[in-house]
Amino acid sequence: MPVEFLGIAATNDGSETTARSGAAFDKEYTLRLARAHEDHGWDRVLFAYGSGSPDPAPAAAYVASRSERLQILLAHRPNVSYPTFAAKTFATLDQISEGRLTVHFITGGNDHEQAREGDTLTKDERYARTREYIRIVKKVWTAREPFDHEGEHYRFHDFLSDVFPFQQPRPGVSFGGSSPAAYAAGGAEADVYCLWGEPLAKTAEQIEAVKAAARAAGRTDVPRIQVAFRPIIAPTEELAWEKAHRTVAAIKDRRERSGAFIRHHGQVQPENTGSQRLIAIAEAGERYDRALWTPTAAATGGAGNSNALVGTPETVAQALLDYYDLGVDVLSARGYDLLGDAIDFGRHVIPIVREEVAKRDAERDAERDAERDSERDADPDAVRGAHPDAKPASHAAPAPAAVTR
């Protein structure tokens, strides 16, 4: 199966290790970072959402209008706009980008952060609202006749949009979370289900939970799986680990100096299940599998995508392939030097992964062909679907005449 690489479309150069050097929306940096991804083999970049951050939709439109191939993953919180309005915004952006848009719906895992923009629903209520919201957006994208909606969170009548997506029938829908409520909502509605990087065994468990939720929702397909990491690479293993320890020291120093984490989250212990899982994994051990390292997550209190993959480009590429072999086909990666790490990862890691994926796919196709050839050689009639006693085709009864009325 094809593999896709997702990077970050930050609007300034700040990170967990370094304070930004300019304004929250630095137009030149935003475009330079996006073009670095486009020029170095990445497929898509995420425009993230925060209550006080620059609006990601116009930033995404700006990048889309100045790039050619780079695809857009636009984060959106349902509490900030009515679904009919949001659906038109997304459709317009999909037209601007000529079909390069996917929308990532964020339910919100922190009550304090949600309340900053007037959202006072409980977590389970937010998941129910998100599920209803996604269904409305999908219908607005595809409906060609006016329709009404009477739901738990939204009511409207006789709505029809006059702007439709470039993609037909609609853009993709992305969703993430690690709680049963998240699995239920995303399993039912998502085209791509997003997870934070965890050990292989735990990731496999989460994938099965997503698949089970999709089946419970009556789906005959399942969402594609995305997993996110913070790669730390260097030419040798020793240099990579030295860089990893410097990174954690920088995270701790920046957090202690600014108090940004507590100001941003309003608490020390996270409420969302995903961050709680990352903290528990970090408490149980620092290193897992081939290259997964948890002190970066521990240093940020499990905030967001924060577990690292540490090693040479070859080691990190092989670690990503381990997740690919689990069924993960969207690999999300973001370094701490956003621009430099995007270039290095694109130059040194992405080509290795793509080459190995192509080999695996070719081997899988060859095995499939060999199995078919073996079955045909063993029982030619069975392969053709014929029975030894079946009459020749010339003796078959004529087909009934077509009904014309």
Image: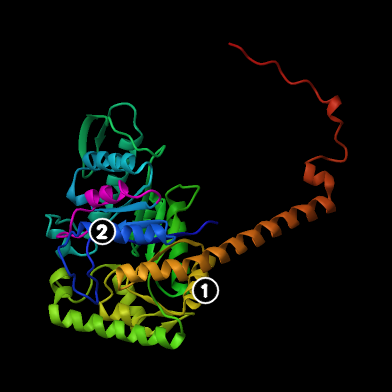
Q: Quadrant of the N terminus?
A: bottom right
Q: Earlier in the sequence, mark 1 or mark 2?
A: 2
Callout 2 crowding tier (Cα within 10 Å): few <14, some 14–19, many ≥20: many
Judging depth in this view, the residue of 100 and 228 nearest the camera is 100
Q: Is residue 304 left or right of residue 189?
A: left
Mark 1 or 2: in front is 2
Q: Is residue 63 magenta?
A: yes
Query: 180 above or below 222?
Result: below
Query: What is the spatial separation of the Cα atoms under label 1 and label 2, in whole angstroms?
Result: 30 Å
- What percent of the width, then of the height, locates residue 65? 30, 46
Residue at screen point 29% across, 60% down: 32
Mark 1 and mark 2 residues within 8 Å of each other at the beta carbon: no
Amino acid type for the residue under numbered disc 1: Gln
Q: Which residue is outermost to the top?
A: 405
Residue at screen point 44% across, 72% down: 202
Q: Which residues are magenta?
A: 49-69
Q: Which residue is mark 2?
A: 30
Residue at screen point 33% across, 75% down: 278
Q: Is residue 127 left or right of residue 171?
A: left
Query: 188 above or below 248?
Result: above
Occupied quadrant, residue 404: top right
Callout 1 crowding tier (Cα within 10 Å): few <14, some 14–19, many ≥20: some
- Point out which mark residue 318 bears: 1
Q: Quadrant of the C terminus?
A: top right
Residue at screen point 16% across, 69% down: 264
Occupied quadrant, residue 164: top left
Q: Is residue 400 magenta?
A: no
* Figure label count: 2
